[in-house]
Image (cartoon, rainbow, N blue to C red):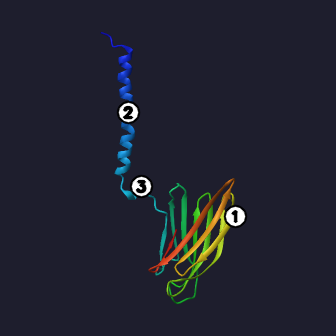
Amino acid sequence: NKPCILELLKVQGVVFVKKLFFVPFIFLCFLFALPAAAQTVEEPELVYDLASDSPYEQLITVDEEGNEVILTIEKLPSFRANLAAGTYRVSKTSAGNWTASYNVTVNSRNQFTGTSNLSLVAHRGSITSSSLTHTSTKATCTFKQKAGIITTNGSVVTTISNGKLVVK
């Protein structure tokens, strides 16, 4: 009454097939059970209140690709009476990749009136093209970085709304 090898293979094969089905099934159940917020990674952003007495704000975080990102807003010295009006230095560093910074000028109505002093530094490869533009509510720096045969796009976007500067 010894079980034959064919019967053992059938039993082991069934167990193997059950494992092949069961593991992905559990994974899919877990994936769909996650809330939507846990499935998406927001782009890091720094919010700076223009009414703040603080001349400097910084956020160090990690982006969706696992790179350290440093966002900074610095109010540059000014003799203007209005606290919010003035010039702010905005910068973003993608650690090991690049650092971009520029100035935004804000008027007494909390609108951008200008951008200047764009600085781009490639920590690897080179910056091949760049632009700095603005509207009354948004300043955008875009650029291309080439490292070896790979070219990537980068950007630093600053918006102004409800008395706050937001850098992404």
Mark 3 and mark 2: Cα distance apart in space:
26 Å
Q: Which mark is residue 156?
A: none
Mark 2 and mark 1: Cα distance apart in space:
51 Å
Amino acid beneath label 2: Lys
Residue for badge 1: 128
Residue beneath the point at 41% across and 55% down: 39
Residue beneath the point at 51% across and 75% down: 159
Amino acid beneath label 3: Gln
Residue for badge 2: 19
Percent across and percent down for residue 37 are: 39, 59
The 10 Å Cα crowd at callout 3, few under 14, some 14 to 19, many 20 or more, is few
Amino acid beneath label 1: Thr
Percent across and percent down for residue 101 are: 61, 71
Q: Quadrant of residue 117?
A: bottom right
| Upstream in sequence: badge 1 or badge 3 | 3
Residue for badge 3: 39
The 10 Å Cα crowd at callout 2, few under 14, some 14 to 19, many 20 or more, is few
| Upstream in sequence: badge 2 or badge 1 | 2
Asked which secondary structure carries label 1, the reply is strand
